[in-house]
């Protein structure tokens, strides 16, 4: 994508303006990464969400430049920290890909930066691919006209204007898990994947218990992201409980420490989650609402800003967010002084 001279100018202005604006606004922020990977052109990583190691280190250094201190979510929420004007930033990673261990961990360890992983527990030490990853790997291995054909045959639809992202989204969000597994079998029939190949890919993709425990020694906090990364909006109360509790139990028993936060898979919620999470004694839920934290935020509905490979997006986003926070403050001050003036007259 070509960036015009005007765009470049705007990015530079935002980059430097944030250094002043961050000091004026001082609100905590939760950042969300998925894969930290050299090969950012790989379609699998792109669909999941990828940041190159160099862009990752750049964004961490940038937040330091803005005066942020990195903290765990527990620290961010304790002692009414949320209510104070603080520049705390939490670095969070979703799912549990090995590339976090390979490319983010060495950098964070060296600088003693705390970080958080929202873990999909079914992937740990697994020799099988998670349904979602198997689905993506199979679909991107096929020519797209075949993908479209399989999709329209299976779901009995003739929508031709879909791209690979749409197809994956529709499969993942619209049907029950048993239908998704039937679809995966349907695709595997076209493109068989042996157990050895699946094991080799899973070993390459996923973290092990040993790697998790090692990272925890150096600042990692392990939190829950569901056992099988299910799309929660279609699940019953019992199914939701099973998905969350299996994950909670795995982290508590195998990784020997209770999680205290839950990260919504796909950013999708349902009416039962909040009650289940508080029943299990967890302190909060992070969503995928893109904004900085506010004084009045409910710990069971915390916003989080997803970072991919486009740092420029973050520079622009921050400027807009800081400016709108300043405008809000000015308006509320004007409103307050107007009321005071009015009262005096009365
Ligand atoms: Zn996820």
Image (cartoon, rainbow, N blue to C red):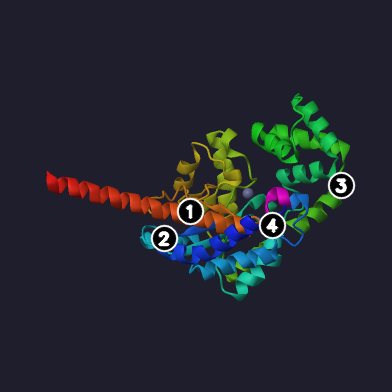
- Residue 97 marker: 4
Q: Which residue is mark 2?
A: 25
Which tag, 3 or 2, sits closer to the chain's start? Answer: 2
Q: Determine crowd level at label 3: few under 14, some 14-19, many 20+ residues with C-alpha closer than 10 A.
A: few
Q: Is residue 39 left or right of residue 312?
A: right
Mark 2 or mark 1, earlier in chain = 2
Q: Are marks 4 and 1 in contact (CB under 8 Å)?
A: no
* Spatial separation of the CA atoms under disc 3 and disc 2: 54 Å
Q: Which mark is residue 321?
A: 1
Residue 294 visible to an observer of this rendering: no
The answer to if 50 sits in the magenta stretch is yes
- Compared to residue 153, the image places residue 89 above or below, namely below
Q: Is residue 185 magenta?
A: no
Whichever of callouts 3 and 4 sits on the residue coming sooner in the sequence is 4
Q: Mark 1 and mark 3: span between their CA atoms? A: 49 Å
- Residue at position x 53%, y 49% from top? 290
Instruction: Looking at the image, tell me whether mark 4 or mark 1 is earlier in sequence order.
Output: 4
The residue depicted at 80 percent of the width and 33 percent of the height is 148
Residue name at image x 78 percent, y 37 percent = 184
The secondary element bearing badge 4 is classed as loop
**Residue contact at pointers 2 and 1, CB within 8 angstroms:** yes
């Amino acid at each position: 994508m070509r960036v015009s001279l005007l765009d470049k100018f705007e990015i530079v202005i935002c980059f430097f303006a944030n250094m002043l604006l961050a000091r004026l606004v001082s609100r905590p922020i939760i950042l969300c990464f998925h894969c930290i990977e050299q090969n950012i052109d790989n379609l699998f990583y792109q669909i999941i969400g990828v940041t190159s190691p160099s862009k990752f280190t750049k964004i961490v250094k940038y937040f330091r430049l803005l005066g942020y201190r990195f903290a765990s979510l527990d620290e961010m929420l304790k002692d009414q920290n949320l209510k104070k004007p603080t520049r705390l930033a939490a670095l969070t990673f979703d799912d549990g890909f090995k590339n976090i261990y390979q490319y983010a961990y060495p950098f964070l360890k060296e600088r003693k930066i705390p970080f958080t992983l929202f873990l999909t527990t079914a992937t740990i030490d697994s020799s099988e691919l998670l349904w979602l990853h198997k689905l993506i790997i199979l679909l991107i291995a096929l020519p797209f006209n075949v993908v479209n054909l399989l999709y329209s045959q299976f779901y009995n639809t003739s929508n031709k204007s879909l791209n690979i992202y749409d197809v994956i989204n529709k499969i993942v969000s619209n049907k029950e898990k048993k239908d998704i597994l039937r679809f995966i079998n349907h695709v595997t029939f076209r493109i068989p994947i042996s157990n050895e190949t699946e094991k080799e890919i899973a070993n390459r993709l996923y973290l092990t218990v040993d790697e998790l425990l090692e990272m925890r020694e150096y600042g990692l906090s392990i939190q829950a992201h569901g056992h099988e990364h299910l799309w929660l909006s279609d699940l019953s109360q019992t199914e939701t409980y099973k998905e969350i509790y299996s994950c909670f139990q795995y982290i508590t028993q195998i990784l020997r420490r209770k999680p205290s936060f839950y990260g919504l898979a796909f950013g999708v919620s349902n009416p039962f989650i909040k009650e289940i999470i508080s029943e299990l004694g967890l302190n909060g839920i992070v969503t995928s609402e893109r904004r900085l934290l506010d004084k009045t935020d409910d710990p069971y509905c915390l916003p989080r800003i997803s970072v991919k490979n486009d740092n420029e997006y973050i520079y622009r986003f921050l400027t807009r967010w800081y400016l709108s926070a300043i405008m809000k403050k000015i308006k509320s001050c004007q409103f307050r002084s107007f009321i005071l003036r009015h009262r005096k007259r009365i």
